[in-house]
Image (spheres, helix red, strand yellow):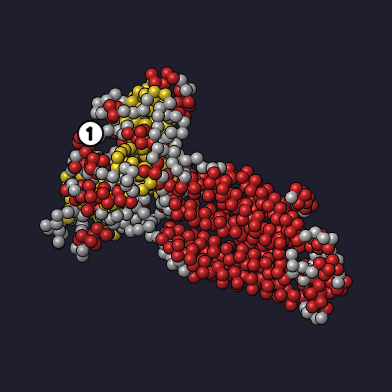
Amino acid sequence: MRDDILIALRRMRRKKASALAIVFLLALAVASVGCVFAVAYGLLWKPLPYPAQERLVQLNLRSAKMGIDLGWSAPYLDAVAKGSRQLEAVVAYRQRETSLFDDTGKYTGTSEVVSAEPGLFELIGARAALGRTLSSDDAAQGADPVAVIGWNLWKRQYGQSPEVLQQRIQIGGQRHRIVGVLPQGSGFPESDVQVWLPLGFAPEELAPGNAGSFGNLRAVGRLKPQYLAASLGGEMMGLVRSDTALKSIADEIDLQATARSMRYLWIGEREASLKSILLAVFLVFIVTTANACSLFMLRMLGRRQELALLEAVGATAARRSAQTVYEAALLSACAVAAAAAMIPVGLALLRFFDVLPAGIPQAIGFDAATVAAMAAMWAVATAALAASGLSWRKQNVYEVLRQTGNGQTASQATHRARQALVVAQIAATFVLLVGTALLMRSSHRLLEQDVGFDRSDRLVGTIQSARGGSDEPVEVLRAQIAAWLAAVRTVPGVESVALSTSAPFSRTVSVEAFHYAGPGNEGKRTLPNAYVSYVSSDYAKAMGLPLIRGRGFNSADADGKAPIALIDEDLAKQYFGDADPIGKTIRVNDSAIGELVGVTVVGVVGRVRQRTLLSRDEYPSIYLPETVPFNVHGIPTDSVELIVKADRPAVVAELIRARMSEIAPAVKFGSLITMERRISDTIVQQIRLNQLLQILAAITVLLTAVGLYALLSSAVVTRHREFGIRMALGASAEHLMRMVFGQSGRMLMIALGLGLPLALLLGAALKPRLFGISFFDPVSLIAVAALLLLVQIIASAAPARRASKIKPMEALRNE
């Protein structure tokens, strides 16, 4: 065996170029599959680093009527925590990004801060590396404000000094005594969280009157051993409906409670994307392995006389086969070793495309499962290479030895095997390209939808307190925003600017009940709901929102907070019918006082998509005037959104940022992006998946072209004498070119016929992710077939031209 391995190594050194090509191709494929598998395994199947991790669940609320996920309100969560027989622990938490200040008030940076019930640390098995974690006494009303910090913050800001327990940290204008430091890597719910504050609920927060205050409250829990997450949703909804006040709101918004594995805190909507990418890289692996097999067969073809001589001098078939298998195994092993070195780069690429999310608790990389997957790929590649290399075994030794050594013949079995490999490549490429085309066209259709306003040349941003809820008076912040807004209007290129509590496609939305005086409304036990936004006077103009009837707001309306409203055309049609709503009074719920307040309709505007591109909004919209709608009572946000219509959005963005630092130092931008970007961010997972699939598809097309070119080139070489004889008998150069193009065309047709059913199966599997197109999309199928036809023509051109240039006398002299 040792001698056979040494012979295989010598053969690899003798033909370095083809060996390196095989190793490089396989290494790319193995690295691609290895990276995606490592991420998929780590996110979907690898155990979480928490005690009883299989029983940890994420508790979710969703309004099916609005089509959005909701945070918990304290009364709902309290009902579940106290009444559940399936949960042995429930923990609530809130997360936000805020500014940090040391004990002297010096700004030290921003951080993710989590306010959590003290039971969180026991739930995730976190113990303090220094000091202690939070206790129930810390969460009691009136308790001394305390904080637990993370290892990275302790190291960066306090130099890992034990005296940190004697210091305080300022968060949101309040000084918190540091009582503990968590070990490195103990961040929850994300690894970059560095501050934890105690969370408790006052009796008034748990009162049924606050049941409709769905905010950013999240919850996780631990199931009792005998229960499963699938049954918990039904129990939670039963507990909700057992309370009259909770049931009324739940029925109104069609509330749904569910429980999923806690890993979905980090996975989110990535599961389908991960599985799609895993399938895509598996197809790339198939195509690449087929290419490698084709190159390996060429290596064997070049050694046919050497192998024939070995057989002639008595080398057994088993010995010759063993040498081929060892060579295949060594090439595959080199490829896997090279792939292992590529995986860190691949993981960084997946992190760039957000396939690998930040903040996950699991370690992603070379774990036992990933090593096993790479070992399996080594075995598959070895078997495929060896099988292709052994296809020459049935040859006539004496016929081979009579040839001149130019390797111009090969068995029919070898030709058929290589053709089958290339057909498999084209078929796999067709399947991958069709899936990619379907997803791309679906995303394009989503983004092309009419959103009800002019999205071009518009910036949208979030403005918030620079100190994250400091004791700076709200009126001071509003005054600075108003002064800055006036300055923005003078910036060159700015056409209009406005503020709103919630611009379209915002993460924050306010849904309020309203009453209208219309037919059929008398005696109704429940009131209809609408999206309610407080907006400045130029909102309609800044948004490009069409005014259908009546008038918009003016500065006097906004300054005086006039009791008037704009409604959208859906509300007008649905609740006023053919009657003119202008001048009519509707009463809108004011959450700050818990009462309906009368407002007069002065205008009707177009319907705007408020929440998502994936489904139509359930509720109409109502707009109320306010000059600076910042920190409005009853609206669940302490920020305000800016909308700017400008000629050059990128240039204007920098100018208005500079004006803010000069005029309004107490506030800052949470974000400032184009409206197109905000809309596309709502389907960012689909877009990033499409980008990654496009890269994989481009690689696969290139590999297919290379494989087809190599096959046709070798076919021209092996049929050199045949073509020479044909030309000597009168065949034209054009006829030989048609033969080469005909061979590649037949292979393409066979591949498309084999790939079409698989492509349709893939399309059917992707059907839930498609929008506006059928999984049997003729445009995608025809476009992909046309692309492969173009690839076939390009790959065939050089071999066909080479065949047409064969000189009959030279070909016959080689006989």
The C terminus appears in which quarter of the rendering? bottom right
Q: Give residue 698's position: percent from left, percent from top.
A: 59, 58
Depth order, front residue of 768/546: 768
Quadrant in the picture for residue 104: top left
What residue is disc 1 on? Answer: 202
* Residue at image coords 53%, 49%: 37
Find residue 645 and report its horizontal and vertical position in percent.
Answer: 40, 49
Q: Is residue 482 visible?
A: no
Q: Is residue 755 visible?
A: yes
Outermost bottom residue: 730
Using the image as rendered, state which of residue 647 and residue 49 is in the foreground. Answer: 49
Residue 213, given in percent of the width and then of the height, sits at 25, 43
- Vertical side of 655 occupied by 64: above or below: below
Which residue type carries mark 1? Ala
568 versus 787 height, above or below? above
What secondary structure is marked by label 1?
Answer: loop
Q: Residue at x 71, y 62 (%)?
A: 390
Residue at the image position 35 percent from the left and 33 percent from the top: 122
The image quarter in which residue 725 lies: bottom right
Q: Position of residue 230 (x, y in %)?
A: 33, 51
